[in-house]
Image (spheres, rainbow, N blue to C red):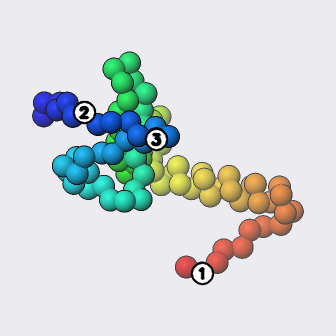
Amino acid sequence: MKAQRILVRVEDMGQVTIPREITERLGLAAGDLVALVNTPEGVLITPEAIAALEDLDQIGDALRASGVTLEEWIESGREIRAALYREKYGSEPTTEPA
């Protein structure tokens, strides 16, 4: 898709309005979060859900590169949280029924 240049005015306190055609295409609604990334060319604005997915993709790539499965990673997090709990409270953590 070719980049389309759209001009918007900077308002008081640095606010800009993202045009409706863009918010609709990105599925943005009032109150949604967007991520701002400072680039050499300017500022890239992405829906936060997309930024989070990109971060998760990078985590997945790092896990695959190190030979760790998602299940192993999740379990190590449980072990770390349990150790921190023991260190802080001096007892074993209890598990609440889901």
Mark 1 or mark 2: which is in front?
2
Q: Quadrant of residue 61?
A: top left
**In this rendering, is residue 17 above or below 39?**
below
- Determine if residue 67 is in view: no
| C-alpha span from label 2 to label 3 | 16 Å
Give the SS element for disc 3. Answer: helix
Residue under the image location 42 percent in, 32 percent down: 37
* Label 3 CA crowd tier, 10 Å (few <14, some 14–19, many 20+): few
- Of 53 and 77, nearer the camera is 53
Quadrant placement of the N terminus? top left
Q: Quadrant of residue 56?
A: top left
Question: What residue is shown with label 1?
Answer: 97
Q: Earlier in the sequence, mark 2 or mark 3?
A: 2
Relative to 1, 26 lies left or right: right
The residue furthest front is 12
Circle on res. 7:
2
The amino acid beneath tag 2 is: Leu
- Determine if residue 34 is in view: yes
Question: What residue is shown with label 3?
Answer: 12
* Label 1 CA crowd tier, 10 Å (few <14, some 14–19, many 20+): few
The amino acid beneath tag 1 is: Pro
Q: Earlier in the sequence, mark 1 or mark 2?
A: 2
